[in-house]
Image (spheres, rainbow, N blue to C red):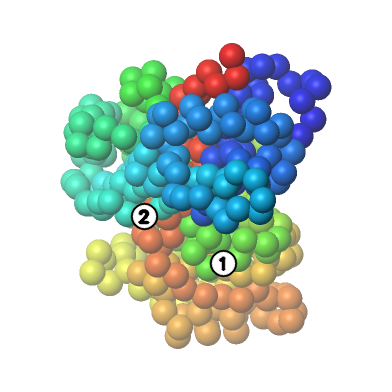
């Protein structure tokens, strides 16, 4: 670690973060192991660990075998020291999960949608959860809209949330780090983690749900957001002379809540054109659909129709997954990252 150009404050953040991360990755470590692996001086590691132990963030699990000198103490990160909160907002429900710093679920519940009321309902829900779980140290909120660094700027049908700095407002209100993310970006991140595809694959997650079509896109393992954070708003794609993708999908039909499965000819045709467009532009490895609205019969039909527009050998793998699970897991992943990097800093180096 090159300490020459870092300020004392930034060094505290970096050192605390890398020690937390390394302990979580390794499971346990001695001060010597941390010092060697991270390239941080032993006295600095000792000072940080001492403060973390005093705060209950780490604890000793025993002594290593002696190699001739004093036996080294081995430390682990306390998984219950910090908790995270993930909340996703949908038209008909609000789902939240509380988990510890290694991702183990403490509670998961479904509540009525806060969209039926206004922002106050979301504030009251979060206040209630924080009172029950005071160790919550980070929060991730998912919304069915476009988000620019925590500001929701495109969320049709939910006027009280439109053009609202939700991240800043909640961080000021609750004094914990907050991430606000588009639902499809969170879902594709969650799928990537759950499926073990944390390499350089390019993935596209497509879902219509209650709010219209949207997509989450990973290229070479990274979320694509675009110059104005509008990537994934596939509803606007002009796939026909006088219809965009949203209009083509919903022409002459309103999906029943009980029968959301895609299968009508105009739906298959619209999605096939979208797949062909994705192949020509980003050539993804995999396109993921929600199992709530897609079955294998429809996927087979889409594969056949898509091959009429682009050569078959370039088509991505088409699969289904559990959208709610992926969405919640993606938010959990974001909250855990903020938990490790953004919680209050102890003055261990002063």
Question: Where residue 214 is drawn, which disc sits there?
Answer: none
Vertical comparison of 296 with 129: above or below: below
Name the residue: 25% across, 64% down: 257
239 vs 229: above or below: below
Query: x, y percentage for residue 188?
Result: 52, 57
Q: Is residue 70 left or right of residue 151?
A: right
The one nearer the camera, 302 or 219, is: 219
Q: In which quadrant of the rendered view does residue 305 lie?
A: bottom right
Which quarter of the rendering shows the N terminus? top right
Rendered view: 208 above or below 36: below
Q: How far is disc 2 from disc 1 in space, using C-alphas?
A: 18 Å
Q: Residue furthest front?
A: 68
Secondary structure of residue under mark 1: loop
Check contact, mark 2 vs mark 1: CB within 8 A.
no
Q: Residue at x 39, y 34 (%)?
A: 56
Query: Label 2 belongs to which residue?
Result: 104
At a point 46% along the width and 24% down the height, the residue shown is 344
Label 2 secondary element: loop
Expressed as whole percent of the image width and height from the top left, the position of residue 26 reads 57, 54
Residue 317 is left or right of residue 139, and the answer is right
The residue wearing badge 1 is 196
x, y percent for residue 3? 77, 25
Q: In this view, does 278 lie above or below 297?
A: above
Badge 2 local density, few (<14 within 10 Å), some, or many (20+)?
Answer: few
Of the numbered discs 2 and 1, the one sitting upstream in the chain is: 2
Image quarter in which the C terminus is found: top right
115 or 273, which is in the foreground? Answer: 115
Between 7 and 112, the one lying in front of the other is 7
């Amino acid at each position: 670690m090159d300490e020459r150009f870092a300020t004392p404050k930034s060094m505290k953040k970096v050192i605390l973060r890398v020690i937390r991360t390394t302990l979580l990755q390794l499971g346990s470590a001695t001060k010597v192991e941390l010092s060697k692996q991270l390239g941080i001086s032993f006295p600095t590691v000792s000072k940080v660990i001492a403060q973390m132990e005093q705060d209950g963030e780490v604890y000793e699990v025993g002594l290593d075998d002696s190699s001739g000198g004093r036996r080294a103490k081995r430390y682990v990160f306390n998984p219950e020291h910090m908790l995270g909160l993930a909340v996703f907002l949908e038209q008909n429900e609000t789902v939240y999960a509380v988990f510890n710093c290694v991702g183990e679920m403490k509670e998961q519940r479904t509540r009525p949608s806060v969209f039926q009321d206004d922002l106050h309902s979301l504030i009251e829900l979060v206040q209630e959860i924080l009172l029950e779980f005071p160790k919550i140290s980070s929060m991730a909120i998912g919304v069915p809209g476009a988000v620019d660094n925590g500001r929701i700027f495109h969320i049709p049908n939910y006027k009280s949330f439109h053009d609202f700095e939700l991240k800043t407002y909640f961080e000021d209100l609750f004094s914990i780090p907050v991430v606000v993310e588009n639902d499809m970006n969170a879902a594709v991140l969650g799928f990537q983690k759950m499926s073990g595809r944390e390499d350089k694959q390019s993935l596209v997650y497509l879902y219509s749900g209650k709010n219209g079509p949207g997509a989450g896109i990973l290229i070479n393992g990274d979320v694509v957001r675009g110059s104005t954070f509008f990537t994934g708003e596939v509803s606007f794609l002009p796939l026909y002379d006088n219809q965009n993708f949203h209009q083509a999908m919903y022409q002459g039909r309103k999906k029943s809540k009980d029968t959301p499965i895609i299968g009508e000819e105009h739906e298959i045709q619209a999605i096939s054109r979208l797949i062909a467009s994705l192949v020509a532009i980003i050539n993804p490895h995999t396109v993921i659909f929600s199992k709530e609205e897609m079955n294998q019969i429809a996927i087979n039909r889409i594969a056949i129709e898509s091959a009429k527009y682009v050569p078959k050998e370039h088509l991505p793998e088409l699969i289904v997954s559990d959208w709610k699970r992926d969405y919640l897991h993606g938010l959990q992943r974001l909250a855990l990252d903020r938990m490790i990097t953004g919680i209050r800093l102890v003055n261990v180096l002063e």
